[in-house]
Amino acid sequence: MLYVRAGASGANDGTSWANAFPTLQDALAVATSGQQIWVAAGTYYPDEGDGQTDNDRSSTFLLRENVAIYGGFAGNETALEQRDWLANVTILSGDLDQDDTPNFGNRANNAYHVVTGANNATLDGFTITAGNANGAWPNNIGGGIYNNNASPTLRNLTISGNQAGVSGGGIYNNNASPTLRNLTISGNRATSVGGGVYNNGGTPSFSNVTISDNQANWNGGGVFNSSSNASFANITISGNRATNDGGGVFNNGGTPSFSNVTISGNQAGVNGGGVYNSASTPSFANSIIWGNNSQVSGSATYSYSLVQSLNPGGTNLDGTDAANDPRFVNPILATAAPTTTGNYRLQLTSLLINAGDNGANSSTTDLDGNPRIIDGTIDLGPYEAMPAVLSISRASASPTNAATVAFTVTFNMPVSGVGAGDFVLATTDRQNGATISSVAGSGSTWTVTVTTVADATGTIGLNLVDNDTIGTTDSPPVPLGGSGAGNGDFTGEVYAVDRIAPTVTLSSPAPNPTNSTIPVTVTFSENVSGFVAGDLTVSNGSVSGFTGSGATYSFTVIPDEQGDVTVNIGADVAQDAAGNGNT
């Protein structure tokens, strides 16, 4: 094991964190086959270290065969699994004189290639940025990573802000078959082709990769495949731009394959905003091509896929039918490219959920790191829909005076493990004492029954609190919202509960005794309905001019003869909004 930590003191011999090498080049110079190099958070430049020439644009981090380099350490770990490469950002930068400005400013003296690959090498947990391949060949290709006849394993990398004078602003693979997994390739530029990635020959394997905000001034804003049999699985290619053809992908020869890929929000100045195929026979399975300024130019084979404005038939969805819109969570317009914005997960109501072919899948996880197949059938695109609550709705009318009320909880797929502990009541007023009395159901529909408080008013709402006890019926079960308590929380509907009966009083301004008609006012304690003149029982008189609504009514009693006149109102002749009859 060799250790690297920027600014390290001690012996600087790489034998421990305390004695770490201060530069990555120092570790690469002495690393032998089978060793690992652990690199702490910080920024490292290829012209720094023993044997390097300051500001030498040809300097590069040359990977070593059979040596694995891991970034993302805080500088005190004793096991690889303790590192957090997302929190402990470790940068390999080509900004040799450390004066770059936004939008590729001050790049004239940057390194041509930040990283140069080697067979059987591993690079894992880094941000690779500020490469500027603008020299003479081969220093005009592969600004971020340059793999020439080299097939390293590249994992957990962000490749951003690199450029090339010809091709492969982010990555250039020439007759190379690297394994590339869990990458973000964004904000890279190429003057000619392959703003994000250029593959020439070989069989590079991309999985769980986001390719966005890349730009080529000619063809292939996101990816350019030249006679390459590259494979792409669980990939989002979005927000890329090509001045000419192939905003997302340009395939020139070869037979690249795409499975569970979403290509959306890309722009081309001429043809193939999503994909441009020239003398190439790409295949697409479980994939979505939708929302580009134009979709596909040239022929391809499709299975279990959706291509806007195209109906390939067979197992594919009809892309000419607007009803088959993928329903992305938050797609972008292609005119916004180049950009990294957009959310290409599927809404829970998308028809593309459970619409794919399991046999075309080669991954155990989706682009979010969640299990790839949930609820039996794979979804289209790189994201698998997680179990989630679709609705928590009242099962009966509101307001109500019922002793119990029920809520219907609907999930987007069959789940198990649903219990009272997964819910909380949101109550007001005197219904604060309401309790959950039962939870029953199966599959995707469950009923939660709540006992209300007698002789009390208030509201009762039901909310689900995700504590990862609810999961799918898969083995092992996938928790609600995917791993992580709280990401499946849901706020449900609310009942207005009124279990207090309205009361009634009668009053009259007439003197007692009187020798005239008697005006009477009826006042209920709340608004009621159903109260009519026929609900009055009058002795020694008759009712005239009955009128009113809500809580107040009035009428006149015309006495029949001398003597007492009485007016009575029976119980339950008028009802409040909850159905309580008056007392």
Image: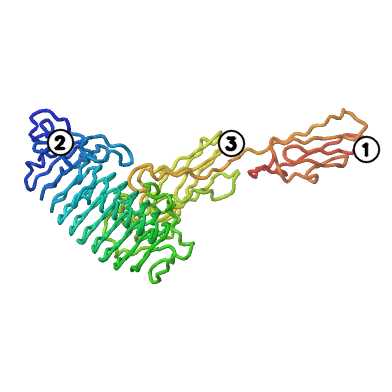
Marks 3 and 2, how far apart at CA: 80 Å
Q: Position of residue 127 (x, y in %)?
A: 24, 42
Marks 2 and 1, how far apart at CA: 120 Å
Name the side, left or right, on which 526 lies relative to 486.
Answer: right
Q: What's the amino acid at mark 1?
A: Glu
Residue 583 in view of the camera:
no
Q: Position of residue 162 (x, y in %)?
A: 27, 45
N-terminal of the pair, mark 2 or mark 1, is 2
The answer to which image quadrant residue 400 occupies is: top right
Q: Residue furthest bottom?
A: 314
Secondary structure beneath label 1: loop
Q: Which residue is mark 3?
A: 456
Which of the two residues, 511 or 135, is positioned nearer the viewer here? 135
Instruction: Give the answer, above or below, for where 379 lies relative to 330.
Output: below
Mark 2 and 1 residues: CB-CB less than 8 Å, in contact? Answer: no
Name the side, left or right, on which 269 lies relative to 535.
Answer: left
N-terminal of the pair, mark 3 or mark 1, is 3
Q: Which residue is mark 2?
A: 54
